[in-house]
Amino acid sequence: MTVRVRLLTSLTPEGDQVRFTVAFAAPAMPRPTPAAEGQTEEAGNEQAEKSEMACAPAFLETGDGQHLELGLLCCPTQTTWRQEHRQDLATYRYQSPGPFTARLRWGDQTAEACVRPGAASVQAAWQQPELQLFAVERLHNQPLRRMVKVLVSGLARGQRLRLDGGAGQVCWIEAQGDGEGGGEWTFSYPKPGAYLVGLDLLDNDGFWLATLGEAPLEITAPLEFLAEEQPQPASAAEALAPTDFSYELAVAASAQPPWLPYRYARPAWSGTRTYTTPGGSQVSRVVGAGTCLSIRAETVVGNVLWYQTGSGDWIPASSVNLITPSELRGVELAEVTIPEPPTPPPTPPTELRQGVVTAGTLNVRPRPGVRADNPPIAQLHAGDQVTIYEEALSDGAIWYRIGEGRWVHSAYVRLLETGTRSVALLSTSGDLPAMSLPVGWVVASALNVRARPGVASDNPPIDQVRHNQVFPILEQRTVGSARWYRIGEGRWVEGSWVGVARLKPRPLSIRPDERWVGVCLKEQTAVAYEGDRPVYAALVATGLPGTPTVQGVFRTWLRLPTGKMSGGNPAYGSYYYLEDVTWTCYFYSGYSLHAAYWHDAFGRPRSHGCVNMSPYDAWWIYQWSAAGGPNSPAVYVYWE
């Protein structure tokens, strides 16, 4: 990892314990030259390619002989750095006045701090610059863009400015010879929503010193492309009240399942009109491509069937095509109660055990233990399978030998042997056998099954699995450059057409009692957790390359059972207007987990940045996470 960290210490309010905090340097970015006076510089062109989150187990050596395992520590991303540039690690009570040298070991990095229990830490002095100008301005006829103007004076040598426009858009501002820094930047926003533009002062190493300015802004969809909306009725009775003509009203099918409360339709052609009343002539709005309508009610007028939309107006049934939402369902997870295995004998086991790596990155060391004289010699990644030859105890922790002079920490290796305590997957419909993570879904329309991995002429297809079909991932092998999964005895499928949900360790910034959803962008899957226990797994569809899903650890800020969504860029044909999008958990600005009734293309990037889920899966997550409170679930979006 190339992320720079510092270990900070402070006293708790009571003064009897030391609080340890890690500080992260801002993610590395190119250092552009500010635009000349009167010029505009495109912030979007300054962004470096987003890298995946750096996560690794963290350990704290207190300096008095204690070794604390902190769990999985993840650095913030471009999007989350302003909120998570400092994270609390632990509190510790020393028994003597010290001083002590504490060390944070995180991946291949070590950060030290001198600790004097009972004495406040001394902060380094630095010069405070003066903010002369910090303005966010609208651009004419460009509702999805904003110009930011900055001018700061009195920047000291080694100080830098970081301008964060939101959604991962970042600019660096360097001091000129006279100590001034600034310029003009234009930020483009792929999604409507609330954003916060922030200007932060950093030292030369990229660590936060102070926030000089913040400006909230609201990005809305272009009004000229929004369908004209009628005022919503005050009540259902008002919506159904007859006017100066009579008609019989049939409420939309009440037999709809709870996860799919509405029916939906698309306009049959661009320029389709809706009307204020069924059978009437007064046009309410004109809808076209990118619009999806919900059906709240229906009636027949003059032998013509009419639908009432989620906006309260009416449209002839002949002017729309009904949408068939995906029937995809994830799988519920339930803990299997298995008796603890007996204490192993002192002699090595006669049968070698197998395990799978659960950490995003796991260091391999020549001997057991985390010490300065025992540095990492290699790394493993989540999903890698290992053979365990023996185990040893170091500083109270069990280590596994996976080869000659190759040891790994046991906390991040899940045993695959029979009798090991594990987690099983249970089908929501009860027609699937119990499975252990990882589990996969077919993303292609159909996928050949072969008797062994590879596509050799003597290894023809023996069966097929179909779109959205779910199965356990029992083994993984690589043949040539292709990844293959064993899904049964003598049954292998090619891995590039399979979305796999794997166990992901809980980041340290998520509490052990929190409900959270881990979203894997590489696999296009999501797993719901209660603390460290997975409870549900699903196939999802995240943002396309041009509108990527933001990475990082977030917490839900708004929960909505239903609502309208609109956005995109009409100039590029990506505009959308969607009625009654259900089971929505907004976790960052306009980015959310929500049901997608308009497609069945889960397992591949598809959205404008949100995490699309099937109606059932979104409903399940929404109902389950409600028990966690208004900011539940936490959402951890990562690449691999």
Image (spheres, rainbow, N blue to C red):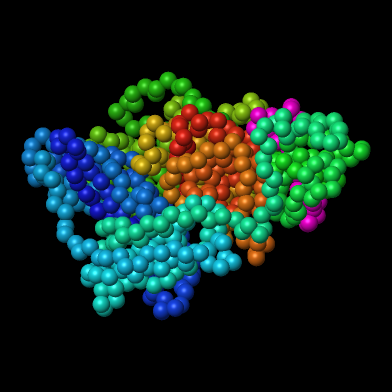
Residue, x 62% and y 48% (percent of image)? 565
Q: Give coordinates of residue 309: x percent, y percent.
A: 73, 41
Give the percent coordinates (x, y) of residue 294: 71, 41
Answer above or below: position of 548 versus 511. below
Quadrant location of the N terminus in the rendered image? bottom left
Q: Is residue 253 left or right of residue 335?
A: right
Q: Pick the residue in front: 140 or 510.
A: 140
The stretch in magenta equals: 252-273
Q: Nearer the viewer, residue 65 or 122?
A: 122
Depicted 64 relative to depicted 54: above or below: above
Q: Residue furthest front?
A: 244
Residue at left 37%, top 22%?
Answer: 342
Of residues 81 and 129, the one nearer the viewer is 129
Residue found at x 29% / y 73%: 180
Question: Most extreme residue toward the right, as rendered?
Answer: 303
In the orientation shown, which residue stands out farthest toward the top? 339
Magenta residue check for 113 = no
Number of disc labels: 0
Residue 567 place in picture, x, y as percent:
61, 55
* Position in image of residue 448 (x %, y %): 69, 46
Asked whether residue 264 is in view, the answer is no
Main secondary structure found in the magenta portion: loop
| Image point (43%, 66%), residue name | 148
Residue that lies at the very extreme toward the left in this rendered image: 97
> Is residue 119 positioned above or below 335 on the image?
below
Horizontal relation, residue 83 to residue 313: left or right: left
Residue 176 visible? The answer is: yes
Asked if the stretch drawn in magenta spans residue 272, the answer is yes
